[in-house]
Image: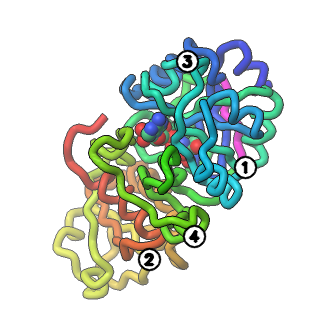
């Protein structure tokens, strides 16, 4: 059913281990444009292409660098996206006119099954309306895209809960474009090389420029040490909410989400918590920060953007 829809130029929401994707046949430029419309996504923000095999990979890239090989061997299938030079045949609508393509092999069985049934690569950004938190459950995609997509495949909650790590793998050193659950340390080990930060001429990962991952409420970040004092002046307003890892002993806000466990567990529950807070009518949401290292780096990247207060996209 999913593959048939894609073949006919339709869109399909499907689960991956990171977040849900809004898929279209990668070699169908009209379908790619439908993706931008359904998401309300600016046309200059390229899509990620998903593949299930080396054969599908070779259809979308011009060449696979030795660095990409090492990273693929270590992390595919899994939450790593590689930026490589694109194949000439890949429609510019998918890459927003860039000469590069972002490509990954997801590990979720439903995603792999869909790719295999179609027999071709699938272009898929996260299945949220542009600027909103990425969907980590089918209901989230339904909330954002109801009436805009004919099919949502429900694979339950996503195992990782944050979008893939994106690495420019065209050169000899990996360049980190978006932190994710694959850490810089793990990348460096697999690449046998230090990880570089993007230079000024790096390809844009436009998520970096605007407010993003944002629920409709205002997001305010609070440090663990501040929370330990159990008083937050701002928590007095009746419409305040709190997402935290530690126990909260202060006055009870209208929404309280306690995500206990390690930072990966926090990452897994975070986007769902932002959406729950919004549904609970929270106007100001306080979110506990984590140390900016390892998986925490990706968590803080998303939280800082959720808390930005420009108009976004
Ligand atoms: O985990 C994920 O990556 C999920 C699942 C569905 O695979 N997808 C996802 O897609 O997060 P999206 O579209 O929400 O984010 C893709 C990011 C954007 O920030 C985009 O700018 C960047 O990838 N990107 C895409 N093509 C690129 C390219 N050629 N060079 C640099 N960045 C690129
Ligand atoms: Mg996205």
> Which of the labelled discs sits on residue 245, or is there none?
2
* C-alpha gap between disc 1 and disc 2: 27 Å
Q: Which residue is mark 3?
A: 91
Mark 3 Cα-neighbour bin, 10 Å: few <14, some 14–19, many ≥20: some
SS state under label 3: loop
User: What range is drawn magenta here?
Assistant: 150-155
**Left/right of residue 156 with respect to residue 285 in the rendered view:** right
* C-alpha gap between disc 2 and disc 4: 30 Å
SS state under label 2: loop
Q: Position of residue 135 (x, y in %)?
A: 53, 45
Q: Residue, x 50% and y 53% (percent of image)? A: 172
Ligand 1 within 8 Å of the CB at mark 3: no
* C-alpha gap between disc 1 and disc 4: 24 Å
The answer to whether residue 126 is seen in the rendering is no
Provide the major secondary structure of the magenta segment. Answer: loop
Query: Which mark is first along the chain, 1 or 3?
Result: 3
Q: Residue, x 63% and y 41% (percent of image)? A: 64
The answer to whether residue 145 is seen in the rendering is yes
């Amino acid at each position: 059913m999913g593959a048939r829809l894609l073949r006919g130029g339709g869109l399909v929401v499907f689960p991956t281990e990171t977040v849900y994707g809004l898929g279209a046949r990668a070699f169908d430029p009209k379908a790619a444009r439908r993706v931008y419309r359904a998401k309300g996504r600016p046309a200059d923000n390229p899509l990620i292409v998903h593949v299930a095999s080396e054969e599908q990979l070779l259809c979308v890239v011009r060449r696979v660098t030795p660095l990409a090989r090492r990273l693929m061997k270590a992390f595919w299938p899994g939450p790593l996206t590689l930026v490589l030079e694109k194949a000439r045949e890949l429609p510019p609508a998918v890459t927003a006119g860039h000469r590069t393509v972002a490509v990954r092999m997801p590990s979720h069985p439903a995603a792999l099954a869909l790719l295999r049934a179609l027999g071709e690569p699938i272009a898929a950004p996260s299945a949220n309306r542009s600027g909103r938190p990425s969907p980590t459950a089918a209901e989230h995609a339904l909330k954002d895209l109801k009436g805009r997509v004919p099919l949502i495949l429900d694979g339950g909650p996503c195992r990782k809960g944050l979008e893939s790590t994106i690495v420019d793998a065209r050169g000899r050193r990996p360049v980190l474009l978006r932190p994710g659950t694959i850490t810089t340390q793990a990348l460096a080990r697999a690449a046998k090389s230090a990880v570089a930060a993007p230079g000024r001429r790096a390809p844009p990962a436009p998520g970096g420029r605007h407010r993003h991952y944002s629920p409709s409420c205002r997001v305010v970040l609070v440090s663990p040490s501040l929370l330990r004092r159990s008083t937050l002046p701002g928590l007095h307003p009746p419409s305040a909410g709190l997402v935290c890892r530690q126990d909260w002993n202060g006055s009870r806000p209208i929404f309280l989400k306690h995500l206990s466990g390690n930072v990966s567990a926090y990452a897994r529950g975070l986007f769902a918590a932002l959406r729950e807070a919004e549904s609970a009518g929270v106007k100001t949401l306080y979110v506990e920060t984590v140390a900016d290292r390892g998986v925490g780096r990706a968590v803080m990247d998303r939280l800082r953007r959720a808390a930005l207060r420009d108009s976004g996209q």
